[in-house]
Amino acid sequence: MPSPDRLLPADPATREVARELLGCVEELPIVSPHGHVAAAMIAENTNFANPADLLVTPDHYITRLLHANGSSLESLGVGGAGADPRGIWREFCSAWPIFDGTASGNWLAAEFSNVFQIDEIPSRDSADRLYEFIAARLAEPSFRPRALMEAFAIEVLATTDDPLDDLSAHLRLRQDATFQRRVIPTFRPDAYVNAHAVDFVSNVQRLVEVAGEGRGGYDGYLTALRNRRQHFIDAGATATDHGARTPLSLKLDSLEAARLFERVRLGECSEHDRDAFEAHMLYEMARMSVEDGLVMALHPGSLRNYHPDAYARFGPDTGHDIPIAVEFTSSLRALLADFGTTRGFHLVLFTLDETTFSRELAPLAGFYPSVYLGSPWWFLDAPDAMLRFRGAVTETTGFSRYGGFVDDTRAFCSIPARHNVARRVEAAFLSRMVAEHRISMPRAREIIVDVIDHAPRRAFKL
Amino acid sequence: MPSPDRLLPADPATREVARELLGCVEELPIVSPHGHVAAAMIAENTNFANPADLLVTPDHYITRLLHANGSSLESLGVGGAGADPRGIWREFCSAWPIFDGTASGNWLAAEFSNVFQIDEIPSRDSADRLYEFIAARLAEPSFRPRALMEAFAIEVLATTDDPLDDLSAHLRLRQDATFQRRVIPTFRPDAYVNAHAVDFVSNVQRLVEVAGEGRGGYDGYLTALRNRRQHFIDAGATATDHGARTPLSLKLDSLEAARLFERVRLGECSEHDRDAFEAHMLYEMARMSVEDGLVMALHPGSLRNYHPDAYARFGPDTGHDIPIAVEFTSSLRALLADFGTTRGFHLVLFTLDETTFSRELAPLAGFYPSVYLGSPWWFLDAPDAMLRFRGAVTETTGFSRYGGFVDDTRAFCSIPARHNVARRVEAAFLSRMVAEHRISMPRAREIIVDVIDHAPRRAFKL
Amino acid sequence: MPSPDRLLPADPATREVARELLGCVEELPIVSPHGHVAAAMIAENTNFANPADLLVTPDHYITRLLHANGSSLESLGVGGAGADPRGIWREFCSAWPIFDGTASGNWLAAEFSNVFQIDEIPSRDSADRLYEFIAARLAEPSFRPRALMEAFAIEVLATTDDPLDDLSAHLRLRQDATFQRRVIPTFRPDAYVNAHAVDFVSNVQRLVEVAGEGRGGYDGYLTALRNRRQHFIDAGATATDHGARTPLSLKLDSLEAARLFERVRLGECSEHDRDAFEAHMLYEMARMSVEDGLVMALHPGSLRNYHPDAYARFGPDTGHDIPIAVEFTSSLRALLADFGTTRGFHLVLFTLDETTFSRELAPLAGFYPSVYLGSPWWFLDAPDAMLRFRGAVTETTGFSRYGGFVDDTRAFCSIPARHNVARRVEAAFLSRMVAEHRISMPRAREIIVDVIDHAPRRAFKL
């Protein structure tokens, strides 16, 4: 069983402080402002298919490391490959030791113990036994999505959705009087605003047809985006999410923008035109957020679908999006010049490039009331990385500019484990601050509640 | 009251070592080789106007975070806006919790406690009471600048000055037999050598008129710079300070340079010409330092006056200079090729980009006798950032290549707090080295005196 | 005498764990898959000339810091300058305190103590006495290279060699039945594939003449490279080593490549052509590794021979190779697209730019079975930097993607000290993981043996 002291500092007196601080937040409900669980799963509330389908295949944190250690993505069922779930499970259990020391290993151990009450260590030997055991639990009513959502104390769960999604699952959940939790959509327009996206042109065409109110060209395009944002707001959305390649923002006047849109739409454009259009649309999305109040979350700096062969065979989100260096300061200047001090506009900045923590993000969030610090994300949502984040930003921004932890996961059962790790890390960081007499204990108690509970509600308007 | 153990490591045995090391330096006089206090303030020695004017308004570390949390710069009196000091003070005290965990919060707590003997925590409730209390102290003779300079044990205080400043305040202080402390000017030529600076052309014209000895063109320009440097030396200066946008250096022959100067002066030049001229002038400033012995401090990598609206309304230095990535290695090659091994030439390199600590600065300072490591600066002059600096550079350079702590502040009363933090951080770092048997205790005692007291005197020729 | 606890964490309970983990590996034989000792030295097995020649002059870690502190490279005998060894030694001992806190100081202290049983601290006073003492030891048979290799328990030692080296020393050692240790060459083709290298054209001409089987042009060039790789394999090599300026890879078809080769060979090319050729050859070297099985080690990001004057007077490898920022993600895409999942292909990635640890290297090694994480290298092969490496990569990759420690040294007597430091650092890191309940003690015991002993054998096919 995972120790109640896991992730807390080794020094005994500091650990004592950390325990007390953890106690202030460990039982608080989960507020999850950004993730990738499907609303339909919760609306339909059917039992999970099997252990592999629940715990291995959809989690590209796990399949990627199995792949690095010799498994084929095919044998893991990635991208809909119809692999035998027992085979996948055996492969996973046999490779268990490679997860030691990883964020995923940590979450998995917590899931096994806390969700399934399993104390046996996965291995080639135990694989089949564990499979049977978990499969049996998954067949029980208490392991259906809604029951788990209760058990996990998830108060708010944001999903990530295509602008043309009808959001029927969300709407059903809102109308279901028996469902008391909050599941809200997030407007993710990448495929419609990133001019380099595969199928960008046909996506835009479809968007304008569906929601352009019969208008054509750039005007129809903006109208359609506004309409779909409103549809999301009506279904409970409070935020948009932007997986931009870069944070570059550019302000074009509407005539220029309209001309550029036409060139890009017709494919009669240079790479530079595409870049400019994306940068302009980032600016435009901020302007729409100022108008309609949706929080703008920005996740740049990942080179998506890096391995061509795996992308061709298994599709996107299969573990080979690789980070690149990112520049925020110059890139965001146009956007922040116009909206950085606009009351009610919230821009939450995420990075995969730790160098920007102290150099760019903390200085920006320490001046602009609109800018919130996104929590360490993806490869960085792990204890040591999160401590580096805190160490890098707090001395400039304090705690009030933090946007709250996001689990960003499609692995439903890992949600409590991820949030629990975040709580432990905050307790660990604050306990050091207290032990070094940098923050008083009464304030540390308030701060940990603020960063765990208030911060996501405040930044994401929940 | 701040704990005597603040910022020292939590492990009891290590803390014991840190206490002893701190004891070696805590009472040493302050040597401040770079800052922004006005010499006139000390020369005139008038009482400080009020608590807001002393502690809030001039400190853009503080006003920026208040701004991020919703205060307008106007309401804080920034840029000469005539706000009511009591209102500013109330706004500041009400927001006190946002400074928890920040470098500024740490310094402020120390100032309140050590300078004003206040133990009450600032808050909306205590604001007026604290205002009265501090205002009363500020009216006392013992709170005039010179008395505080004595009380703070500031032995040397360097200011930062415009090349055309007549330095009359400095000269008065030098001639005043009743004033025993050392206040020295620093030659800061940015506005006259950075071709992108606002008013560059008129600045240069004025410079040549005042100090060009009647010569024209590039020759008059260099002559004027040399003359003003000499004026600074005569007033006690030992250093120049360069807030260059980048550390790019370029060696042009004098004919080329003269032609480029004319183009830039007439505004008949490209952006690239301006960049080239700046880079050449950085090289030229190094050459002049070789000639006249002034230490050259280089602070690149800040995008100044980032927010156009705040700049237009409140002027420079109002909290929105934002760092960008910096490259030293290739950039400084021309300069170091010619002067990096020149005896007596000192180049102190500062960075806001932590990535350069281990990658570029330590390797350069570990080879070139002319290169000194500037202390972590601005957003990085905080305990965790300073420990990261030490952890990043020491294994390559040891301690001997360090240029000493600079407080870089216009907040006079924060000077002792800032230097005290630096002393605690060095004690904390060295105590870990001792506890891990990496440095002997006798050597650690010598090293802490060296880095706190000898390093700034050595690097800045004090 | 160095403490048995040096480099272990200060917290008593954590240190206890670290001691036990260190005990699992401290006595294991040394596997050194990358370094710069000359095979001839071991083949000839002659006594070392004198203390300066053994410990100071060939170690540019040491001469560079002496240079920064005022010594001339000439007075240290660098580059074959015929300085008096006693004078060099005195200069070194007098400057001993500057090495406090450095990686080199740490190794030197361990060498003095463990190799020479000296407890006296070097100083101006002790210099001559230490010189005599060490010189006397060096005259003993037990201080000849082979005896030391036994005493140091070096099981495998890889050298770094020019492709046209006849490897006669290696072949002699292989045929010497009295020599039981393994000394293997490494194919280092920089001078023949980096089109910017000094003498690139004449190097290539010589290569083709010697090993091109009479073929001309690009075909002869590739043939010659293949032949020399085979020669290395025949002499025991398992790896190639690439000190590329950047990790840029580019796939050209053979016609394009042949044309580019001609242009570069004739000097009728642009800088961009040279860059393209280098990038293509990196790709080509990977293709050859796929064919012949040699592990490919890549060490990019150093601006070599930075100081023109020192290079002109003292030659390469004299302490002024300075790191620059490096980009792996986009750069390696072409190479990894084709070979990243090829069974048997091993690419070990080293960096001097810590920013790539978490941002690029761990994500790449956590997906590609071909990619191994090179240990922190050069300016980063020091305790704190190594801990930062572990902290940055482990949460993404675990321990299984690690390529093992490389000492990368020409300082023969520092090899055990360097490997010992690596073992202590791994023990320190793992002890924290255990203390924080992130890894179980039984697994930590297995992991430390894996990273110290199995990792280099696995990654470098030893």
Image: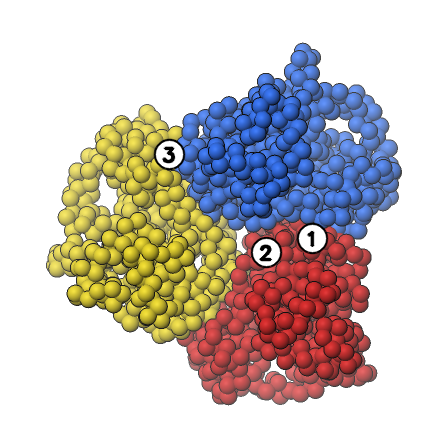
Chain colours: A yellow, B red, C blue
Residue B14 is at least partly visible in this image: no
Please name the residue shown 77% across and 81% down the image.
B214
Q: Residues within 10 Å of mark 2 (few under 14, many from 20)?
A: many
Quadrant position of the C terminus of chain B in the picture = bottom right
- Between residues C144 and B305, which one lies in front from this camera angle? B305
Please name the residue shown 50% across and 88% down the image.
B82
Using the image, determine if residue A117 lies above or below residue A302: above
Q: Is A400 situated left or right of C269 in this image?
A: left
Q: Give amino acid for label 2.
A: Glu
| Quarter where residue C304 is shown | top right
Please name the residue shown 80% across and 76% down the image.
B234
Disc with the residue nearer the chain's start (2 vs 1):
2
- Between residues A428 and B391, which one lies in front from this camera angle? B391
Q: Nearer the viewer, mark 2 or mark 3?
A: 2
Using the image, determine if residue A441 lies above or below residue C54: below
Q: Position of residue B17 (x, y in %)?
A: 65, 52
Q: Which residue is mark 2?
A: B327
| Quarter where residue C236 is shown | top right
Q: Position of residue C439 (x, y in %)?
A: 44, 38
Q: Is B205 situated left or right of C446 in this image?
A: right
Secondary element at image label 3? helix
Q: Give amino acid for label 3.
A: His
- Between residues A286 and C88, which one lies in front from this camera angle? A286
Q: CA distance from mark 2 to mark 1?
A: 15 Å
Q: CA distance from mark 1 to mark 3?
A: 43 Å
Q: Which residue is mark 3?
A: A67
CB of mark 1 within 8 Å of CB of mark 3? no
Q: Give amino acid for label 1.
A: Ala
Q: Which residue is mark 1?
A: B365
Q: Residues within 10 Å of mark 1 (few under 14, many from 20)?
A: many
